[in-house]
Image (spheres, rainbow, N blue to C red):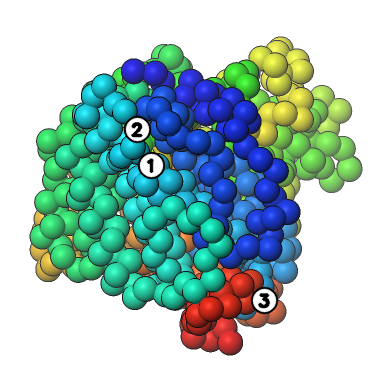
Amino acid sequence: MKSLKKLILIGLVLVTAGSCNEQDFLKEEAFGFYSPENSYTSPTQIESAIAKMHENVRNMLFENNDRSFIFQYTADYAYDAINPTHALNSWADRVFPEAGEVDWMWRSFYKIIFNANVILGRIGAIEYSSEEERAAHIAEAKFFRAWSYRGLGIIFGGVPLTLEEATSPVRDYVRASRQDVWNLIIQDLTEAVPDLPGADDVADGRVTKGAANHLLTEMYIIVQDYDKAISAATEVIENSGYALMQNRFGSRSGEPGDVYWDLFRRDNQNRGSGNTESIWVSQYEYLTPGGGRGDNLPRFLMPLYWQLKDDNGENLFTGPNENFGGRGIGWWAPTDYWLIDVWQNSNADMRNSEFNIIRDIVANNPASAFFGQPIIASGAIDDDFPDPYNRWWNVIIAKGAPLGNFPEEVIQDPATGLTTNFANSSYRDRYMMRLPETYLLRAEAYLLKGDAASAAGDINIVRARVNADPVSPGDVDMDYILDERARELFAEELRLLTLMRMDKIVERVRKYDPMHNGKYASNGINDHQNLWPIPNQEIERNTEAVLEQNPGYN
């Protein structure tokens, strides 16, 4: 089977050959109308169209600069560390019907849905030599439609359901109920599971039965069918060939570190490289046209350490360095909730080890009086930055950058590790789903069903792998599960969606995000903002029916 990376490249060629210039036209049309990017007349073109949906997801979540990180820094464990009014630090000021971020979110999900509908509408007329291949293509398209409606339903509530390709502008959309959205997602996923491949029967990056069952677990939790949620998660955990990585692995396993550190080194993300806990992985292929450089986490999450100065005004560092995460700018930073609170009494938890959260680094500029000394321990800088939006230093989170292993093309001085300005991407594939999250979803279902003992059991499987102390059933509640998700899945899970589906976003943003405590942001998050507004331009374009706005945004 062709690799997904090769299929994406083929898709780019086909799209370029068959596309028309419609950008200006689309600006005047209703949201549901997109012209097909190429005609689909063969299984190969359907494969390329599916690869294009993978690319759409990758671009949306990882490559759209600050907008991609809306799923992270607008929540409880991270924030925009530039200034109080930047981007979405102030929900009341920046989450409104005319906001560009709101429109981007809406249109990004619907673009994927449109592409899925085109495939589903045209695939029946295409001649296949294998009906099994046709069924697999249908299943993968339904998965992407379900994945996209899940995002829309969580963020916006009930939304218009489009199940067919729009061949002309549509101006009479009405919102389906949120329950109808959930029902469609569950239907698409349950229909997809039988025809999706198993974990060992597909190229890295493609959607599997495990990915669909993982998403089904979350959906059954949303509709409060906890027995089905437990069953779907159990299918992934026990019957799909996945297992938590327990021992060191990969090309850097001989270096100081631990198995959690190994999970995030370059080339270690896929099942093809021996990683048995990866369920769905977004693919990159550095130095291949269209293959990308990986996500922008090193740029946005790594601190601006390379501009720190000592008391004499001398730089502490000679410049960006691959050993310290490359050219970070500290655009978004972890909150004290993640830096401190979740690690209280963490003891031997390797996720908080010196390899995975680096809380002090050694100055490397010979011109500084602090050369060769740890910058925090020596007092070269104060780690207690009074303004949370001026944190040039917080910590280096190892999962956010290829520490000591950036591509040679971005290394300026191999002897010192000095990098060019292009040391700002991860240059690795990106997890979409990992098995620990499946365990934590099943724990959530058990807890909501009233079985705290089984919930603790699943949480402790995740904790045992990282040498963390077990939790007792009496200490497990929804906040504890959120804490464990933060420890295990920081900068991986779409935290915004997690908190919104649990109806926790308002509560936890107010409690943990320093931009919403009344001291920095002029207007924090409002009570009604567990849902985002419907983009105003979509309401205005929908001239033949009423597209109702969410409460609080009129």
The residue that label 3 is drawn on is 93
Viewer-nearest of discs 1 and 3: 1
Q: 492 or 379: which is nearer to us?
A: 492
Viewer-nearest of discs 2 and 3: 2
Question: How many neighbours does mark 1 have within 10 angstroms: few (below 14), some (14-19), or many (20 or more)?
Answer: some
* N-term-proximal mark, 2 vs 3: 3
Amino acid type at image mark 3? Asp
Q: Residue 212 appears at what percent x and percent y?
A: 26, 45
Mark 2 and 1 residues: CB-CB less than 8 Å, in contact? yes
Q: Residue 51 appears at what percent x and percent y?
A: 45, 33
Label 2, secondary structure: give it: loop
* Picture disc at residue 270: none
Instruction: Find the distance from the CA under tag 2 to the CA under tag 3.
Output: 49 Å
Image quarter in which the N terminus is found? top left
Label 3, secondary structure: give it: helix
Mark 1 and 3 residues: CB-CB less than 8 Å, in contact? no
The residue that label 2 is drawn on is 126
Mark 2 and 3 residues: CB-CB less than 8 Å, in contact? no
Q: Residue 463 appears at what percent x and percent y?
A: 26, 44
Numbered circles on residues, count:
3
Q: 330 or 46: which is nearer to us?
A: 46
Amino acid type at image mark 2? Ile
Q: Residue 491 appears at what percent x and percent y?
A: 49, 47
